[in-house]
Amino acid sequence: MSSLYLDHLATLQRQAEAALERTGFDTLVIAAGIEKYAFLDDRPYLFQPNPHFKHWLPLTQHPHSWLAVRPGKRPRVVYYQPDDYWHVPPSAPSGEWVDAVELIIIREPEEAAQSLADCVTPRTAILGEADAALPGLTPNNPEPLLNLLHWARGVKTPYELAQMRAAQRRAVPAHRAARQAFLAGASEAAIHRAYLVASEHTDRDLPYSNIVGLNEHAAVLHYQYQDETPPAESRSFLIDAGAQVNGYASDITRTWAAPGHDEFAALVAAMEVEQLGLVDEVREGVDYRNIHLSTHRRIARVLRNAGIVHMSEEAMVDGGVTKPFFPHGIGHLLGLQVHDVGGFMASENGGVADKPEGHRYLRLTRPLQAGMVVTIEPGLYFIPTLLRQLRGSPNAAAVDWACVERLSRYGGIRIEDDVACRGAGEAPENLTRDAFAAA
Ligand code: GLY
Ligand code: MN
Ligand code: MN
């Protein structure tokens, strides 16, 4: 019987067998990981599973579990299910994965060593953090093998794309609820709570901490607080928030202007035109670095048309004038991790594909392949510290500082969609916009 998940599992098994063969290993063992505790305390941090583990299994809250992959055999899952009356232990194994694996249930973490003993040879690759180690199971994380697996992870299987579409559908109603709360004058904290309710998530479930910024707070790229008190006037609202389904993330940003703030609303609209243009550049074979560089040309156009900077677009880009307004990368790989691994790899054998000179915050430098999911997240911000530097530069005379001061009250703009690259000549799939359209 076939299904998206079973096909996904078969693909991973094939990839793993090929990678083991090429790197001279017999078997692959993957630790889910363990809970970590605050220093001198008995409170654990939120559990973060080894992404390699959740690549194979839709199990995200399963510390002390393990997976073994052996050529020609079913994966073995060592499933930790303690007798624990302090916490809710993992429920009895259920779901499609159960019948596809060889399952061993353990009640104590240490039992994993024995349950995996027959899978371990002197040539076993063990993936995990050092603190997951058990006798005979010390993670060695061989780099040549990791390179092959990380490179392959850039391209999603149909099962993974289905999870990621579902993660969009989960986030979209929450983005709408957040916008309603903003329009009603809610505080950042109240907007955040409206988002959680509508996404049916708690903070524990989010793929990353929500960024919820009103007015000037929208200028802080990773604004980490949420004021409980609403500002006297809510002029603008930037929200960067996702959702998670079976360990796969969405990563979505929207920026809104309050009614009556037309100058800022027009700037948001101009940025949206360019953002959609950038999404359309996500095509097989395109070097993602060129999409980043294209962003600077497009932002130069926006700055010029809005009367913020009076310079030719070319001179603006050449003179680095767009950089203080757009001081981050255009996006990154997305999947099991919000900033998914492998973004800088030169090839499946490793090495580094350099960032364009002077663009240190770009997180993806690979040519695009069909099946990759990337974010496209251009921004235009009014960041006091960067504007101060611009003001002290020879280009300052070309800037309309009164206009900058007016717009600074809105903080900034980011618009972020998650986009799947399709095959040769095909337009990309905009996972985010599709979900907004369907909602
Ligand atoms: N939410 C983090 C990012 O957009 O990369
Ligand atoms: Mn984001
Ligand atoms: Mn992002």
Image (tube, rainbow, N blue to C red):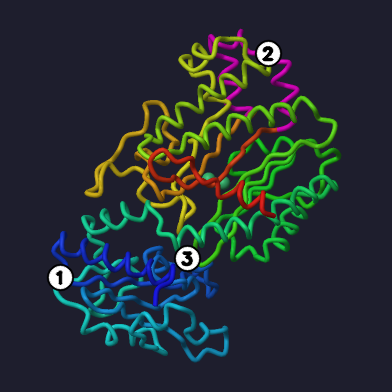
Please tell me whether mark 2 sits on a helix, a strand or a loop.
loop
- What is the span of residues highlighted in magenta in the rendered image? 383-410
Disc 3 C-beta below 8 A from ligand 1: no
Residue 201's spot in the image, x, y percent? 65, 65
Task: State the separation of the CA atoms marked 2 and 3.
Answer: 47 Å
Vertical arrangement, residue 168 with respect to residue 401, above or below: below
Name the residue tied to disc 3. Answer: 48
Q: From the viewer's perspective, is 417 left or right of 109?
A: right
Residue 198 seen from this side? yes
Q: How many marks?
A: 3
- Quadrant housing the C terminus: bottom right
- Look at 71% across and 35% down and name the residue there: 216
Closer to us: 178 or 33: 178
Q: Which label number is shown at residue 123? A: 1
Name the residue tied to disc 2. Answer: 400
Q: Amino acid at mark 3?
A: Gln
